[in-house]
Amino acid sequence: MLTSQVIFVAFFGLVALWFAVAVFRTKSMVRSALALLFCMAALGGMFLAMETEFLGVLQIMMMATEMAIMAIFMVMYMMDPGGLMGMDMTHQKRTSIVAGVVGGLAAAGVVFVSPWGPVAVHAPAATTQMFDLGIELMGRSMLLFETTGVTILVAMIAATTVAIVRGQRP
């Protein structure tokens, strides 16, 4: 029996796959970034359909911001961000096709071979899940998340510093 939840998960999954293919089929970096944004938003929709609201909203917020910034930088720094000169968005086509097929088969193998365990008969209420997630994030995982955030910030500052040509004024 198909429930509305299964229908929405399948719908958002198909939308995510459609836009994932569109990322590589377009001749424009900006259109590619927008297709990637829609793909990630569809994944957020899948999380929301699976009743994992925190992950769904987090996915949509993070990816929307990231893709907007990426599109802005592409427009600023790319020779042809609109794709009017007919650039090719794929490189090493045979290698990437082989890698994609092997990765897909490996993922499918993991899905069908892994012992998933019993399905939860009763899930805790959403408020209990959010409380438990908050305790987990603010407890033992806090140091990991804070260290990762600072490391990413330092890496962005270092990459920007290295990219700047010394002595050149705009």
Image (tube, helix red, strand yellow):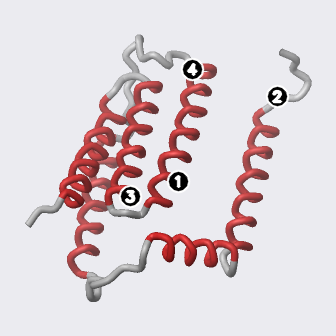
Q: Which of 57 and 89 is in front in this view?
A: 57
Label annotation for residue 152: none
Q: Where is residue 41 in the image (x, y as percent from the top left)?
A: 41, 44
Kindly give the residue lying farthest to the left in the view shown: 1
Q: Residue at x 50, y 60 (%)?
A: 54
Drawn side of residue 76 relative to residue 170, left or right: left
Mark 4: which amino acid? Val
| Extreme residue toward the right, this view | 167
SS state under label 2? loop
Give the residue pinned by disc 4. Answer: 75
Q: Compared with residue 126, is residue 18 higher up or lower down, i.e. above or below?
A: above
On screen, residue 138 above or below 92 = below
Mark-to-mark CA distance, 3 and 2: 43 Å
**Residue 107 position (above or below residue 47):** below
Which comes sooner in the sequence, label 1 or label 4?
1
Q: Which amino acid does label 2 sit on?
A: Val
Q: Is mark 4 on a helix, strand or loop?
A: helix
Residue 47 is marked as 3
Looking at the image, tell me whether mark 3 or mark 2 is earlier in sequence order.
Answer: 3
Q: Which residue lies furthest to the top in this view?
A: 84
Label 3: few (<14), some (14–19) or many (≥20) C-alpha neighbours in 10 Å: many
Q: Name the residue under label 2.
A: 165
The amino acid pointed to by label 3 is Phe
Residue 124: quadrant of the picture: bottom left
Instruction: Please name which of the two marks, 1 or 2, marks the residue nearer to the observer.
Output: 1
The quarter of the image holding the N terminus is bottom left
